[in-house]
Structures are given as structure tokens and as C-alpha cells.
Image (cartoon, rainbow, N blue to C red):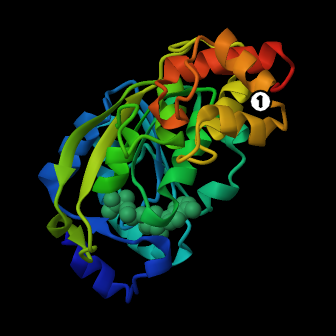
Amino acid sequence: MEEIKTILLKHGFTFKKQYGQNFLTDGNLLDAIVRDGGVGADTTVLEIGAGAGALTRALSAQAKKVVALEIDKSLQPVLAETLAGCENVEVVFRDFMKEDLPALEAELGSYRVVANLPYYVTTPVLMRFLEEAKACEGVTVMVQEEVAARFTAKAGTPDYGAVTAAIALRGEAQITRKVPRTMFYPRPNVDSAVVRIDFEAGRIPVRSESAYRAAVRCAFLSRRKTLENNLVNAFRISREQAKKVLHEAGIADMVRGETLPPEALARLADVLFEAGMAR
Ligand code: SAM
């Protein structure tokens, strides 16, 4: 295959910064990401952002099927060339954030996500899989290094936040490799890392996932405030009621939400649910 750069040039493609278009070209790195993603001959892959198709092609060589979404229709002639002969690939020119995920899942069956995510929308894309997906087996995504640090942070550290707690409900996030900025074309201003999350149903048991989300929102409402204060503000309850909730959840007074591991947030969620404060 001709160099990706030559193909882009030939088709007069102009990069659109607003879409986070930083493409990969190195064959060894692409193969390594496919391996990191746990892709095998039985795997259906959903890729968000086909770009010039380099990762799509590498995925196609190992996977049963690849469905790749791409927002930028001007990549159509480029992808027609780079994915020629990849019979198991379907490229869909749509915005993933507007996608009907249940309808897409009905078409895919069980699937894994593997993607070099556009930086401007990394967390919202991941949150959709964490909160809405029913048939997703796992997500392996290239993200900015500092975002990878947030995804994999431990409770009580500065990087630990609402997204870390949301990930913990589904699986454990692991950095599988660091990728320097020099591996992208055009070169971004930051380094990146690949993060893999294998989804395990019921990993942290909760009575209600939406109550868990409410507990997480409350815990991180104001990082500087105690959880008790955040409970008072988030649920408009008295200080005594907030103390009672904490006591029932086995959480000490005066703690700040950011120090609570996901298991403690799950206990808080169950108490909020049973008290009818969260559904
Ligand atoms: N997969 C390619 C690679 O690794 O070289 C491209 C990765 S590039 C970082 C991200 C791609 O996502 C771009 O091609 C961009 O146009 C596309 N994209 C951005 N926002 C999107 C969205 N909301 N839905 C689908 N694709 C999107």
C-alpha cells in the first residue's frame, strides 16, 4: 500500500483540527494496538474515527468484522483506497455522538471497541460505552497521556475523579503502552497512551447503576468540600440526614469524596437508592 501521507496528498485531503485528526502510520504500532485490544478471528470491532484507515486495515487483518465510524465525509476517497480489498470492513460516515447505540449494537452483536480517539471528545465517547452499552466486551483506546492517568488513577490521588469511578463499575483500566507524539501525523502537542478496559458484568455490585452515577456526581460535586457537605448540597437534605446516610454506608465523617474507592461509592449509592434519594 502506498504511504498514507502520499494517499492523503493525492486526494487533496486537508486536516480538520476540530475533529482531532492525528493519524497513525507505523505498521508495528498499529499491529501492537490490535493485540492490545484483544482482537482475534471471532471478534467484531467497532472503531470510532477511521481517519485514513490505517488502524482499520490492521484490525481488518485480525478481526471477524470491523465497523468503523467516521465523521468526516471528505475521507471517503482516501478510505476507498486504503481499505480496498478489506471485505470485512464497513465504514459508516456518521458522528458517533449522535449515533443510536442500541440500534448499532443490534447490528454488531457482542463487540470490542478499538480506536485512536479524537482528543476533543475522548471522555464523552468513553462515557457512552460505560453508561449505555449492553453488548460491549471491552474498550481499548488511544488517549492523551494525562487522560490515561485519569482513567487509571487510584482513589485519593489528584487524577482520581468521576470518570475513574465510572470506569471502575465496568472494569479495571490498564495502560498497555505509551505512544510518543512523534508517532502521529500531523504531530500533536502531547504524548499518548493506549488504555484497555475489559468489561466484567457485576464487577462492583450495585442496586442501581443510575444511583451509583448520582453518588459519583455527589462525591465530586466540589472536590474541596467534605462528602457530608456535598450530600447536603446535592440532595438538599439536612446535616443530620447527611450524617445518617454516611453512617449507613459505613463512611467516616469528614471524608472528602475524592478519597472514596469505587466500592465505598457503591455502598453510598445503595443507601441513596434505598432511601429513595436516587433511582
Ligand atoms: N483511526 C485513525 C488513525 O488511527 O490513524 C484516525 C484517528 S484520529 C485521532 C480520530 C478520527 O476520528 C478522525 O479521523 C476524525 O475525523 C474522527 N472523528 C472525530 N470526531 C468523530 C465523531 N464524533 N464520530 C466519528 N468520528 C469522529
Residue 202 in the image: above or below residue 29: above
Quarter of the image for the C terminus: give it.
top right
Is residue 142 visible to the viewer in this orientation of the structure? no
- Residue plotted at (68% across, 52% down): 99
Q: How many marks?
A: 1
Residue 34 in the image: above or below residue 261: below
Residue that mark 1 sits on: 239
Give coordinates of residue 21: x percent, y percent: 39, 72
Give coordinates of residue 121: x percent, y percent: 52, 60
Quarter of the image for the N terminus: give it.
bottom left
Secondary element under disc 1, as helix, strand or loop, is helix
Ligand 1 quadrant? bottom left
Give coordinates of residue 264: x percent, y percent: 54, 18
Q: Nearer the viewer, residue 60 or 202?
A: 202
Does the closest atom of ligand 1 sit within 8 Å of the Cβ of label 1?
no
- Residue plotted at (28% across, 45% down): 194
> Is 92 situated left or right of 9 in this image?
right
Give the amino acid type for the residue marked by disc 1 in the picture. Answer: Arg
Residue 184 in the image: above or below residue 127: below
Give coordinates of residue 267: x percent, y percent: 62, 14
Q: Nearer the viewer, residue 163 or 78?
A: 163
- Residue plotted at (32% across, 35% down): 37
- Residue plotted at (12% across, 50% down): 28
Determine which quarter of the picture holds residue 41. top left
Q: Dot 1, how many residues are within 10 Å of its Cα: few (below 14), some (14-19), or many (20+)?
A: some
> Is 30 situated left or right of 261 in this image?
left
Is residue 78 visible to the viewer in this orientation of the structure? yes
Q: Nearer the viewer, residue 276 or 207?
A: 276
